[in-house]
Amino acid sequence: MAQEKNQSNRKKNFIFNLIIVLIFLIGLGILIYPMVSAVYYDYRASDEVADFNAEAKRLDQGGIDARMEKAHAYNQSLTGHESLNDFYTEAEEEEGKAMYAQMLEVNEKMGTVEIPKIHQELPIYAGTGETVLQKGVGHLDGTSLPVGGRTTHSVLTAHRGLPDKKLFTDLDDMEIGDVFFIHNIDETLAYEVDRIDVIEPSDFEKLRIEEGGDHVTLLTCTPYMVNSHRLIVRGHQIAYTPEVQEYHEEGKAPWWMKFFNVYKNYMIGLGIVVLFFILGRIWKRRKGRTND
């Protein structure tokens, strides 16, 4: 009789322990899902970046020059300054408007933006529709194409706080003096952050083209998960000197280093949870043996 009772208790304990472990594993899965999905997106994004770079290298220089001319013509059409209209004919400007971003696109991508401070390198697509913003960074229609040049201002926007990807989630970590990079079909452009602001969604004043300026602004929603305003991080182009190139190369950390830098706090918290769970199970077993 006692033996049957012990077997029954063991069976109940086994089922109870199994349920606890299953609950823990389900909770752990829910907890790590954002990290796993974000890592997977980073992997996909790096593929898109590699695809753009590989396809851009296949273009002949004559074709690249022609495309870049059209892109600059498009940018010229946005200035509204008559004094600058001598550079391009009206027909060239109209062609630039009609083609919009097509002259820069390779496999639907206009280029890539690389932000070493927040460990992100992302593909840039034309437009800011939800389909685009779920894939990567969108180029705001009506702003300059990201090819640099006097009297230009390109605005690039991306989501933050998505459960399955980082994108511009950590953009608020940027500081004045940080440098980010734009890669287009022809060259790499370096931009140094010179302005950080929070604006109303309807306020476009700080996104306007400035006479003689060469700017790129990174834009996302803020505050985090509230999204009532817009965070803008503006940079002006700087020379791609050996020092800037060295900074650029240092920012190209291996994927595992990027993973650790982005998710180190997350992994520490996860490790603490797992450790407490294991210690709890060990303590319970020892207590059970003591009672026996």
Image (cartoon, grey):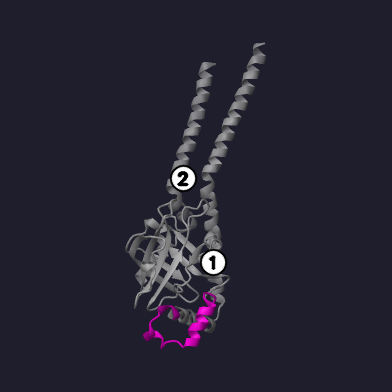
Vertical comparison of 75 with 204: above or below: below
Q: Residues within 10 Å of mark 1 (few under 14, many from 20)?
A: some
Residue 230 pos. (x, y %): 40, 59
Say which residue appears at 43% left-offset and 48% top-offset.
264
Q: Judging from the image, what secondary structure is the residue with disc 2 in?
A: helix
Residue 231 pos. (x, y %): 39, 59
Q: Nearer the viewer, residue 27 or 152?
A: 152
Q: Judging from the image, what secondary structure is the residue with disc 1 in?
A: helix
Vertical comparison of 202 with 82: above or below: above
Which quarter of the image is occupied by the N terminus?
top right
Report the amino acid beneath label 2: Met
Residue 290 pos. (x, y %): 51, 18
Q: Nearer the viewer, residue 147 or 220?
A: 220
Say which residue appears at 47% left-offset and 62% top-offset.
121
Q: CA distance from mark 1 to mark 2?
A: 28 Å
Vertical comparison of 212 with 156: above or below: below
Tell how many labels: 2
Mark on residue 50? 1
**Disc 2: which residue:** 267
Report the amino acid beneath label 1: Ala
Query: Does 99 lie within the magenta span?
Result: yes
Q: Which residues are magenta?
A: 77-103
Say which residue appears at 60% left-offset and 30% top-offset.
18
Query: Does 156 lie within the magenta span?
Result: no
Sooner in the amino-acid sequence: mark 1 or mark 2:
1
Does any portion of residue 54 appear in the rendered image? Answer: yes
Which quarter of the image is occupied by the C terminus?
top right
Q: Residues within 10 Å of mark 2 (few under 14, many from 20)?
A: some
